[in-house]
Image: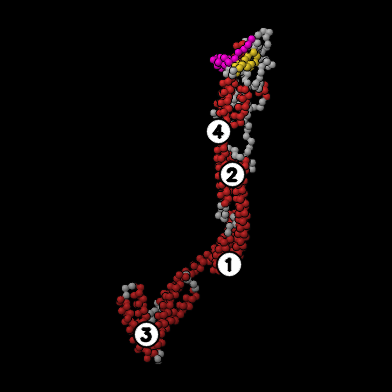
């Protein structure tokens, strides 16, 4: 990835060309242009033609074109120069006088005014540079280039004016420029340090994400976080100060390593996930095949148990991917529904027939319960014959609902017990050995009946009282049978 140290646009500082102001009017027969002859003027700065050949550059030290100066400013500058009868212009430079050019075809006033304006032009450049130093946009390169060009122009300028003051101002600007460069350097140092700190924070976030990768990682969410960090990195690279290549490369290496770690771990996870899904798909397809093999079975109990086992295996098989899981589940559900719908239909049919059987048996119960109580042995024999017929018909009817089975069976057994009690009593009465025990048994029954009467009288619970009364009725039948 392309990173730092992109070449910035260069800021070169080149002053604009000096403005030439012709001071003499053209006269008939005179030189066509009343300007100093190039051969006679000592140039200490690049000519307008030389400036024109230069590449475009920043011009912080150049005054605006066509600057007009007050007559007072021009007169103050003129006080530092003179023009001799030959048109030679001189300027006071410290304690000495220096020739700055010739203007033979113009008046002394025009020649002196021309060079005074050139002084004011140069001073304006210094003033413009002073303002630039106070701005927040100046660059160190601009300061260096402006100082260099202004130093050349103020060394021995071809101007008329207070040259000593001009040089003093230039030296002050050099000192200010050096201070400004140091200030800019310190600012850049602080900005770079801050940028490195901010870039390091992005790297540390990425490294933390990479260090926390594991079985519980939300890979999609983590990928979004890495993408956001990369966008933040690029935005910081575009908008912040440029940092040193060594620092930039080191930080990028760390950030790239964290992203590489994430990408490698995500690929491993994706591969393992695909393997698990393929295995789950194969397992579920096998389960579906088994379900299709038993879906038409009418062995309701055993097949229901098998389908429950298949469902447990399905849950343990894991996920095969959303699209595959939906399609596989639909196939398994179809096989299961085929079996369970058939089982439900059969169960509903059985329930209907069992309810019909219950109604029939309840009718038989009415007939059986009408046989008791029996008074003697003869009645017991008749009741036994009738009960046997009822029981034969009872067995032929078939099953009843499970919840009602015990209830009606107990009622039929109660009829059988009452008839049997009379039969047993009659047998004991006719038994030769029973006579010896008859008296003792009768006494026991009378004692038990007396005890039951006392319990019935003392019992307050209706259910328990009813049970005692039923027991008393049975014993009274026994007693009647042995008399």
Task: Judge left or right: residue 210 versus residue 31.
Answer: left
Q: Nearer the viewer, residue 300 or 88?
A: 88
Residue range highlighted in magenta: 69-85
Q: Give the x, y percent position of residue 460.
A: 31, 73
Q: CA distance from mark 4 to mark 3?
A: 133 Å
| Within-10-Å neighbours for mark 4: few <14, some 14–19, many 20+ | few
Way the structure is coloured: secondary structure
Q: Mark 4 = which residue?
A: 183
Q: Mark 2 = which residue?
A: 230
Q: Mark 1 = which residue?
A: 297
Whether residue 372 is visible: yes
Q: CA distance from mark 3 to mark 1?
A: 58 Å
Q: Give the x, y percent position of residue 150.
A: 61, 24
Local SS, label 1: loop
Of marks 2 and 4, which one's residue comes earlier in the chain?
4
Q: CA distance from mark 3 to mark 2?
A: 106 Å
Local SS, label 3: helix
At x 39% / y 88%, what residue is drawn? Answer: 429
Quadrant into which the N terminus falls: top right
Quadrant into which the C terminus falls: bottom left
Q: Mark 3 = which residue?
A: 481
Of marks 3 and 2, which one's residue comes earlier in the chain?
2
| Quadrant assignment, res 314 | bottom right
Of marks 2 and 1, which one's residue comes earlier in the chain?
2
| Within-10-Å neighbours for mark 3: few <14, some 14–19, many 20+ | many
Foreground label between 2 and 4: 4
Q: Is residue 78 magenta?
A: yes
Q: Are marks 2 and 4 in contact (CB under 8 Å)?
A: no
Foreground label between 4 and 3: 4
């Amino acid at each position: 990835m392309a990173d730092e140290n992109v070449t910035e646009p260069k800021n070169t500082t080149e002053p604009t060309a000096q403005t030439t102001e012709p001071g003499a009017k053209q006269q008939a027969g005179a030189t066509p242009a009343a300007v100093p002859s190039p051969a006679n003027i000592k140039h200490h700065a690049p000519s307008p033609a030389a400036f024109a050949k230069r590449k475009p550059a920043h011009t912080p030290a150049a005054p605006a074109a066509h600057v007009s100066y007050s007559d007072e400013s021009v007169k103050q500058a003129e006080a530092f120069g003179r023009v001799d009868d030959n048109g030679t212009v001189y300027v006071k430079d410290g304690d000495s006088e220096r020739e700055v050019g010739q203007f033979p075809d113009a008046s002394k006033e025009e020649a002196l005014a021309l060079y005074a304006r050139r002084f004011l032009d140069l001073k304006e450049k210094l003033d413009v540079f002073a303002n630039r130093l106070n701005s927040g946009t100046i660059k160190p390169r601009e300061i260096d280039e402006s100082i260099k060009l202004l130093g050349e122009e103020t060394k021995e300028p071809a101007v008329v004016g207070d040259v000593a003051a001009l040089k003093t101002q230039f030296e002050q600007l050099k000192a200010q420029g050096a201070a400004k460069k140091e200030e800019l350097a310190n600012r850049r140092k602080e900005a770079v340090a801050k940028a490195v700190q901010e870039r390091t924070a992005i790297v540390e976030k990425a490294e933390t994400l990479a260090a926390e990768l594991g079985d519980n990682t939300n890979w999609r969410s983590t990928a979004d976080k890495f993408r956001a960090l990369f966008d933040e990195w690029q935005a910081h690279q575009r908008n912040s100060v440029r940092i040193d290549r060594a620092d930039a490369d080191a930080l990028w290496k760390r950030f790239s390593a964290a992203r590489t770690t994430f990408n490698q771990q995500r690929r491993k996870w994706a591969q393992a996930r695909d393997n698990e899904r393929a295995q789950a798909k194969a397992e579920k397809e096998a389960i579906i095949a088994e379900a299709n093999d038993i879906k038409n079975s009418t062995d309701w109990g055993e097949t229901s148990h098998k389908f429950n086992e298949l469902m447990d295996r399905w849950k343990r098989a894991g996920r095969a991917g959303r699209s595959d899981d939906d399609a596989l589940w639909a196939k398994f559900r179809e096989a299961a529904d085929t079996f369970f719908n058939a089982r439900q239909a059969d169960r509903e049919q059985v329930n209907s027939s069992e309810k019909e059987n219950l109604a029939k048996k309840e009718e038989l119960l009415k007939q059986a319960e009408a046989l008791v109580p029996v008074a003697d042995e003869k009645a017991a024999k008749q009741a036994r014959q009738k009960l046997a017929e009822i029981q034969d018909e009872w067995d032929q009817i078939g099953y009843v609902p499970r919840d009602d089975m015990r209830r009606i069976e107990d009622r039929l057994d109660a009829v059988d017990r009452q008839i049997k009690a009379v039969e047993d009593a009659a047998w004991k009465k006719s038994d030769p050995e029973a006579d010896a025990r008859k008296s003792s048994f009768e006494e026991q029954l009378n004692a038990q009946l007396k005890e039951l009467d006392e319990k019935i009288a003392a019992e307050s619970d209706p259910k328990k009282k009813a049970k005692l009364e039923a027991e008393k009725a049975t014993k009274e039948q026994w007693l009647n049978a042995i008399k």
